[in-house]
Amino acid sequence: MPELIHTCYRIGDIDRSVAFYGALGFEERRRMDLPDGATNVFLGLPGDGDRLELTKNPGVDSYDLGTGYNHIALTVEDLDDTLAGLAQEGIQPEKPPYQVRAGGSRICFVRDPDGYRVELIERPA
């Protein structure tokens, strides 16, 4: 069976993006310099594989994100605690946490330094 192993974002600044995803709990696993001058950085959550690849292309500081792609999603134990920790890193949610349906999980979105959205979903108690 096929297995989804990672997604890749093109980024403008490696250190800024690695710090953002580090605040969400990702660990930098490895960096790889490519022959064309690009750098790939692989990140993963503790106990999981390298699920996020960040690519910095030489001479490119920003990208047009378009309207098709929307977000990645992460589960968190306590959404309020997670948001408080992110706030200490200067990361604010797009809007306060909410539920899509009554009795559903609380969610909210944050944006990484390049504008990519990350959905935070509180695990049920």
Image (spheres, rainbow, N blue to C red):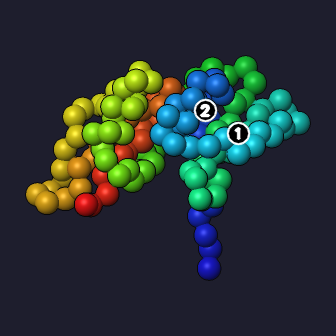
Q: Is mark 1 on a helix, strand or loop?
A: strand
Amino acid type for the residue under numbered disc 2? Val
Camera-side residue of 30 and 94: 30
Where is residue 82 shown, x and y percent of the image?
36, 39
Residue under pointer 1: 41
Q: Kindly give the residue lying farthest to the left in the view shown.
A: 102
CB of mark 1 within 8 Å of CB of mark 2? Answer: yes
Vertical arrangement, residue 89 with respect to residue 30, above or below: above
- From the viewer's perspective, is 62 left or right of 36? left
- From the viewer's perspective, is 112 left or right of 45? left
Amino acid type for the residue under numbered disc 1? Val
Where is residue 84 shown, x and y percent of the image?
33, 31
On residue 117, which mark appears? none
Residue under pointer 2: 18
Which residue appears at 64% of the width and 25% of the height?
15
Which residue appears at 51% of the width and 43% of the height?
25
Vertical arrangement, residue 89 with respect to residue 72, above or below: above
Label 1 CA crowd tier, 10 Å (few <14, some 14–19, many 20+):
many
Q: What element carries label 2?
A: helix
